[in-house]
Image (spheres, rainbow, N blue to C red):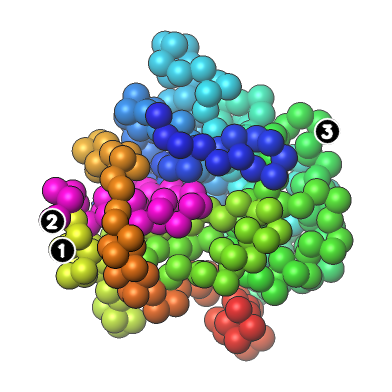
Amino acid sequence: MAKKIVLNNGVHMPVLGLGTWLADPFPGLTGPAVEAAVREGYRHIDCAFIYQNEEEIGEALEKLFKEGVVKREDMFITSKLWSCYHDPNDVEQACKESLERLKLDYIDLFLIHTPFGVKRGEIFPTPDTVLGYDEKKMTLTWKAMEALLPLGLVKAIGVSNFTITKLEALLPTVSVIPAVNQVESNPQLLQRKLREYCRLKSITFVGYSPLGSPGRLEKEKDDVNLLEVKVIKDIAESHGATPAQICIAFMLSLGDATIPKSTDELRIKENFAASKIQLEDHEIQRMKQLDKGYRRNTYDWLLRPKVDSVETAWDIESD
Ligand code: A2P
């Protein structure tokens, strides 16, 4: 059983979860993946409206609960408020719709998916409908997130893709401190300052894309395939493990949570087994040297043309 972390409101979250992002282009893959994962022992599934596969996940979960493979209370399910639902009047409804798709009566953790807004109702943003980040509006969205807690719709609330600058703006306005900040993090993007900041503020850091998203490398950006990096391959060899397992074991060694995505049953098992690998201190130090602060997921499509740049939108100077 995967180790758990206690969130700032006392809710327990398994540190290793199954990511379901980018499983959506192939309907029919995510349901069986979730089923295989839960049978293997995963108890944390990371979902989102925008991944467009919550219904499949809901069906898989319903089947697993009915068959007695796992109890609802032993699962930790995350979902996320998409960026076109930042209007406070839309938050409860968006949450209820995720619940309906997931066939659940509560979500363990509900996150604001991105700090960047999109015009109300425009699910897939265009350059004309992106609204960028609005510090004041975000405080109102967060208030509406807080209102979900007493309704029993969610056990914990948090944010995703927030930088230190954005958390600094939000935190003084909140009644409930976000339980989690879920951001991209892998051996070449450790986000050390953000991790430290989150720790200081009692916000649990969850890293997505711990393998560096090997399925979507962009040649023109000189993307590195982490699974081919010599240091990682060498460490993998000495543990009789795979490079993916070493990436996951390393991310877990940092004391936070991580959610590798896979829809392949063997890789789902392989990734889960990574939590048993104990890296030596010298291996952790070698892995840390791979950090180059390279962000693959900049959400360019949510940035306002001519107004936002990757640097300003992600507070790259100040981070
Ligand atoms: P697949 O779903 O076919 O297994 P990340 O979580 O960093 O975004 O990475 C997800 C990508 O990594 C997906 O393309 C996934 O493909 C692939 N992947 C997941 N687990 C492994 C593994 N153990 N070895 C190699 N590739 C993997």
In the rendered image, which quarter is residue 115 located in? bottom right
| Residue highlighted by disc 2 | 237
In the rendered image, which quarter is residue 276 located in? top left
Q: What amino acid is found at the position of numbered circle 2 in the picture?
A: Glu
Image quarter where the N terminus lies is: top left
Q: Report the front residue among 312 and 10.
A: 10
| Residue highlighted by disc 3 | 150
Callout 2 crowding tier (Cα within 10 Å): few <14, some 14–19, many ≥20:
few
Q: Which mark is residue 234?
A: 1
Residue 226: x and y in percent read 27, 66
Find out whether the residues at labels 2 and 1 contact each other: C-beta distance under 8 Å.
yes
Q: Report the front residue among 300 and 7.
A: 7
The residue shown at (29%, 81%) is: 222
Instruction: Mark 2 and ligand 1: say if the CB distance to the nearest ligand atom is below 8 Å.
Output: no
Say whether disc 3 or disc 2 marks the residue closer to the N-terminus: 3
Residue 182: x and y in percent read 56, 56
The residue shown at (17%, 70%) is: 230
Residue stretch in magenta: 237-262
The mark tally for this picture is: 3
Q: CA distance from mark 2 to mark 1?
A: 5 Å
Query: Would residue 218 be seen by someone viewing this image from the given angle?
Result: no
Judge from the rendering whether residue 115 lies leftward or rightward of residue 268; answer left or right.
right
